[in-house]
Amino acid sequence: MVGYVRVSTDRQDHSPAAQVAALERWCGEHGAVLVAVHEDHGASGGAPLDRRPGLAAAVDAVRDHGAGVLLVARRDRLARDTMIAAVVGRLVERNGGRVLTADGVAGEATPEAKLMRTMIDAFAEYERMLVKMRTKAALAVKRGRGERVGKIPYGFRLADDRVHLVEDPAEQKTIARLAKLREAMSLREVAEHCRAHGIRARDGEWWPRTIRRVLGRTTPPGAASTRDSSC
């Protein structure tokens, strides 16, 4: 088995650890060997394959390891787009495997199961479109109130005026610690050090990609520094 994990939010039931645990539990129950797990973090289920390196690597790993299965915790972890799900399924088949889910839904190689997989993919895409529409509407309301919209960068928080950003002392301290670690370690080693020592990111665990993004960010427009300019 080759495993694939995708996470785009900090929901506990969708966390990387929860998904990996589901894959390992399924393999244990079925006497299977999980030879590799590839992950995408902060990746939308509607993102194409070329923007999901973890998924692309998992598809290739099916061929490289001679694996018979690409295993995901749930069907919507593979994709929330019917076309992308179909393409991935075809690529996996071309590499000698098939896609299975740890929740056991529609895994059989029957016409009925294939129809069920297509329906699951369609409903996942519909749910993604609903979330996108609701988010767009909520942002429009905030703009109408003159409030700031968009994700607040790590190291900052929203000021009392709900418009400007100010530095968050605790997160700024963590950034400084990450920068110090980065001087002697690779991004992956820094991430592993953080997990080993309980250094948490705002949305959960630190990963190489998020560390690179945080350390490469300059002060965003509209941010008001809380530091004393005399220091």
Image: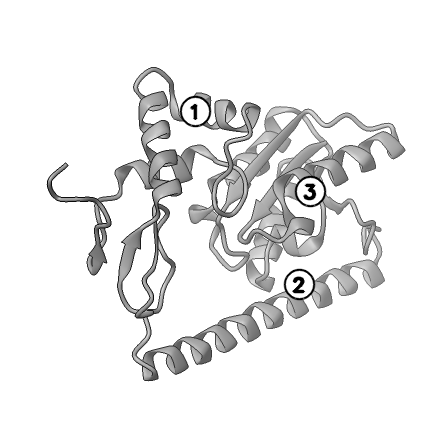
Q: Of marks 3 and 2, which one's residue comes earlier in the chain?
A: 3
Give left or right: position of 147 versus 192.
Answer: left
What amino acid does circle 1 point to?
Val
What amino acid does circle 2 point to?
Asp
Q: Which mark is residue 190?
A: 1
Residue found at the far top of this picture? 184
Image quadrant in which the N terminus is located: top right
Could you say where residue 222 lies in the image, as x and y percent from the top left?
Answer: 20, 60
- The Cα atoms of the two marked residues, 2 and 1, are separated by 36 Å
Asked if marks 1 and 3 touch (Cβ < 8 Å), the reply is no
Taking the spot 48% from the left edge, 46% from the top edge, the residue there is 202
As drawn, 40 above or below 223:
above
Give left or right: position of 17 versus 190.
Answer: right
Residue found at the far left of this picture? 230
Q: Of marks 2 and 1, which one's residue comes earlier in the chain?
A: 2
The residue where tag 2 is placed is 121
Could you say where residue 217 lies in the image, as x and y percent from the top left?
Answer: 26, 43
Q: Which mark is residue 19?
A: 3
